[in-house]
Amino acid sequence: MKILYGVPSEGMGHATRSKVIVTHLLASGHDVRIATSDRAADFMEKAFPGRVFAIEGFHLRYDKGTVDHWKSFSHLVAAAPESLVTNVRQFLRVHRGFAPEAVISDFESFTYYFAKTYRLPILSVDNMQVINRCHLGFPIPEHETENYRLAKAIIKAKVPFCARYLVTSFFDAPPCKPRTEVVPPILRDAILAAKPCEADHILVYQTATSQSDLLEGLREVKGQEFRVYGFNRNEAHGQVVLKSFSEEGFIDDLTSCKAVLTNGGFSLISEAVYLHKPVLSFPLTGQFEQFVNGAQVERMGYGRRFNAFSPDAVKAFLYDLPDFVQAFNGHRQDGNQLTLAAVDRFLSDAAAGTLEEGEEELA
């Protein structure tokens, strides 16, 4: 079957898990093309040469660890005319040169609208839909209510009316809507093959490099080594070591760390949980999905969530570290096999013409 696969470029977690699924699809004999942009396009082209349609995507802008909605919107408006021309051209290239029979979208709009334009069956595979299609298992705090409503509205509007939804989640999240299946996170082969051990460092991954107080704050935590990714440079500031990104180096530091300090990104938290690494989460303000991930880490006993970064928060987390390690006892997961089996069922039903037409619920 000819399959068009959509991957957003905001965060590389979408690309790394999509690589796992695309690899499986190609090995199963399907013909796959990938629509994505920027870093994700480079990543997927390297993995699957000649199979990528480079499109223009949307990017968030940050200010001191907070999502800047105005800057993000302004960038979108400024880039819209050129982006539209590029994407229309690629839209026609996909139709005339490839003519897919089914679409899989990892929270990506170009492929979604392609599927709807040509009435193709579409499968949604992503973690964001947990906010729209699942029970989160905890009451929404009053100060996060507006962020929750905004996030749910955006997620609901992003890829509605799909034939099926596969929702990846590291925490228990029972579906509350039909055509929805929840699976554990999809992990790259390097993580599945890793053999965790424990050194004395803490892995730090910082998405918003505008958070200028991070390095100074980490230096106040005496006697603790931090290996920091996200600033894209190699420097040493006492016990705080900045490292340029390399997949091999990052995985080595992740598998050997004693804990992970990050915002609230799904992919790294999922990998940390799989490897039984306690997590200290500082979700980006204004990103409700990151708030959910941090809250779930704390609810499960796998770490702590704080509203803002501070040296005292790091010290409090380290004080309770043995308890977080103990909480992982008995934790196991196998998201890859469950997800790939569900993808295969979708494609089999699509080929047989037995998929039900998607209808979006009002709630």
Image: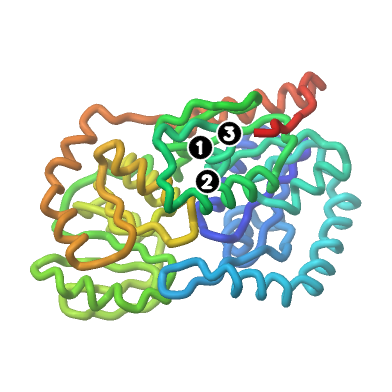
List the residue tagged with mark 1.
168
| Direction front: furthest residue | 142
Residue at x-position 15% and y-position 60%: 315
* Crowd class of label 3 (few under 14; some 14 to 19; many from 20; radius 10 Å): many
Secondary-structure class at tag 1: strand
Mark closer to the observer (1, 2): 1
The amino acid at mark 3 is Arg
Is the residue under label 2 in contact with that under label 1 (CB below 8 Å)?
A: yes
Vertical side of 188 occupied by 359: above or below: above
Mark closer to the observer (1, 3): 3
Q: CA distance from mark 2 to mark 3?
A: 20 Å
User: Which is more toward the observer, 47 or 181?
Assistant: 181
Quadrant in which residue 260 is drawn: bottom left
x%, y% of residue 361? 70, 31
Residue at x-position 50% and y-position 71%: 62
Residue at x-position 48% and y-position 34%: 336
Vertical side of 92 occupied by 4: above or below: above
